[in-house]
Amino acid sequence: MEKILVTGGLGFIGSNLIELLLKKKYFVINIDKVSYSSSFYNIKDFKKLPNYKFIKCDINNKKLKDILFRFKPKVIFNLAAETHVDRSIDNPSNFIKSNILGVYNLLECFKKFSKKNKSKLIHISTDEVYGDILTGRSNENYPYNPSSPYAASKASSDHLVSSYVKTYKIPAIITNCSNNFGPKQHPEKLIPKLIYNILNNISLPIYGKGTNSREWIFVEDHCDALLKISKIGKIGSFYNIGSNKNVENIKVCKNLINIAKSKIKIGKNVKIKFVKDRPGHDIRYALNSQKIIKDLNWIPKTTFNNGLIKTFNWYLKNSKYYSSFKKKDILKRLGLN
């Protein structure tokens, strides 16, 4: 049974990717440092499977090298990262430690491991490294122009990985994905926070005027793309992964309200509330994903609305998920500094 290692597997995308890999009959080793955004609820359905193994470990830890040599994974998906822009505004240091220094340690460990073992590293990044895309769509050759400490830390990690490919010839691929949504996402993020507020009769905070536009992709589609890239992606390449579907935040909110009304009786406090915008808030992200569509024959399968319905249904059915986090991590406003 082929072994695959996933870092950050207690998080949103990581746990969804592990679920897909287990269904495909891989043996999965989940590495996670267990931070505020980690949730064992995310892996409750498969934690006892014989082809699943969890190890608590920070990617900054030197023992990561020992784990690699012990299990000898054929593929490593690096999803371990601090990802919330608002938190990066309040405290950039955690993002430097995880997203830059952590990736550096991972690369050093992988460099030694890959010299003696056939393996490849898939480093998962974000569309935010390109910064504001007011018109058109950014392809893989677009210059990096990050606006937040989070985006800058991810841009730095991308450059690090790319430099190790060129200098040390490590077998690695970098992916840049648009905004993910779906089950198991931490409620500090827009869509699960709105769903939490709807279910708890709380007003719905929207930054600025709600006109900020994001390209949304359902998490299962992203995971499908990552698996395909790991199989037939070209070493040293960058791949954008997107849906080509942009939606303004205000429309996301209104769509969710309509979906909720068709499922439950919503409270009188469930109303849109415009709040002070965060510093350096990019207006629009938009990816050109023609490379992965053309070269790897991949396309997203889930429409935005269908994905939103699936997402709402999951949180409605799994209301206990929210209780796995501290209430302050759901409701406290960050990123005003």
Image (cartoon, rainbow, N blue to C red):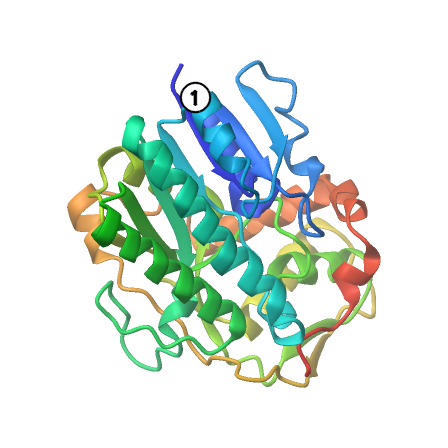
Residue 11 lies, in percent from the top left, at 60, 45
- Residue 40 location (% of width, % of height): 70, 36
Q: What element carries label 1?
A: loop
Q: Where is residue 76 in the image (x, y as percent from the top left)?
A: 41, 36
Q: In which quarter of the image is the C terminus?
A: bottom right
Q: In this view, does 165 lie to the left or right of 197?
A: left
Q: Can you give x and y, in whole percent of width and height, for residue 153 in the image?
A: 47, 66
Identified at 38% across, 48% down, the residue is: 123
Amino acid type at circle 1 is Tyr
Specify few, some or many for label 1: CA neighbours under 10 Å numbering under 14, 14-19, or 20 or more: some
Residue that appears at 67% across and 86% down: 276
Q: Which of the 4 image quadrants contains residue 120?
A: top left
Would you identify the image quadrant in which residue 314 lies? top right
Specify whether residue 242 is in view: no
Does any portion of residue 319 appear in the rendered image?
yes
Q: Which residue lies furthest to the left in this view?
A: 295
Is the residue 150 above or below the residue 220 in the image? below
Q: In this view, does 271 lie to the left or right of 17?
A: right
**Quarter that holds the N terminus:** top left
Residue labelled with disc 1: 26
